[in-house]
Amino acid sequence: MLSAFAEQEYLVVPQLLDAGVAKFIAAELRLMRSVQPGTTGDRQVAESFSVYGPMPGETLLQLCQPTIEAATGLSLLPTYSYARIYDTGAELVAHTDHRQCEVSCTICLDFDADPPWAICLETPSGREIAVTQQVGDAVIYRGMRRRHWRTPFQGRWHAQVFLHFVDANGPYTEERFAKRPGIGYAV
């Protein structure tokens, strides 16, 4: 796995998260959304419910870090988590991420769509690929270097959690915890 990540700058990890746990977190996010009426998406995806640093995501930063380090061969420092529930028509425009997302992991939590919605990435050679995730599946990628996007969503809803890290031996170590006192703190 190490050489694949080093070469391609992305890696698919089936069932990084137990499907039951993933669905539980998706249900928590859907409940959060239902008790916060009128909450809309963010600047990237208006057709979504978004939350910075949800406690389940912050917990996953800690729990998944050793697995992500083993898969990438890197020592990592956590920055922050983020979650979205995408709605019909949502689209994530092709982009690269900011420096707090040197290494990112996107985990499919649950969805109501047929077929499942793919995340698209550009490889170092410029080839575009589409990765379809099942519940609990993860894609780890170099967020700052690999363009990634999602085409317009045709299903009813799709929940994802994002875990972001920086390389502990890289130039962005000051971004640890996204400049918060620690994991779990508000911005």
Image: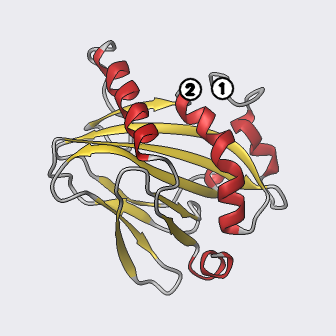
Residue at left 67%, top 23%?
185
Label 2: which residue? 55
Is there a contact, CB below 8 Å, between mark 2 and mark 1? yes
Category of crowding for the residue at label 2, using alpha-carbon neighbours closer than 10 angstroms: few (below 14), some (14–19), many (at least 20): some
Secondary structure under the numbered disc 1 in the rendered image: loop
User: Residue 41's image quarter?
Assistant: top left
Residue at left 54%, top 70%?
10
Residue type (three-letter) at the residue carrying disc 1: Gly
Location of residue 90 in the rendering, given as x and y in whole percent from the top left corner: 24, 46
Residue at left 61%, top 33%?
58
Placement of the N terminus among the 4 image quadrants: bottom right
Location of residue 31 in the rendering, given as x and y in whole percent from the top left corner: 33, 20
Which label is found at residue 184?
1
State whether residue 100 appears in this view: no
User: Does residue 119 lie above or below 41 as drawn?
Assistant: below
Q: Nearer the N terminus, badge 2 or badge 1?
A: 2
Which label is found at residue 98?
none
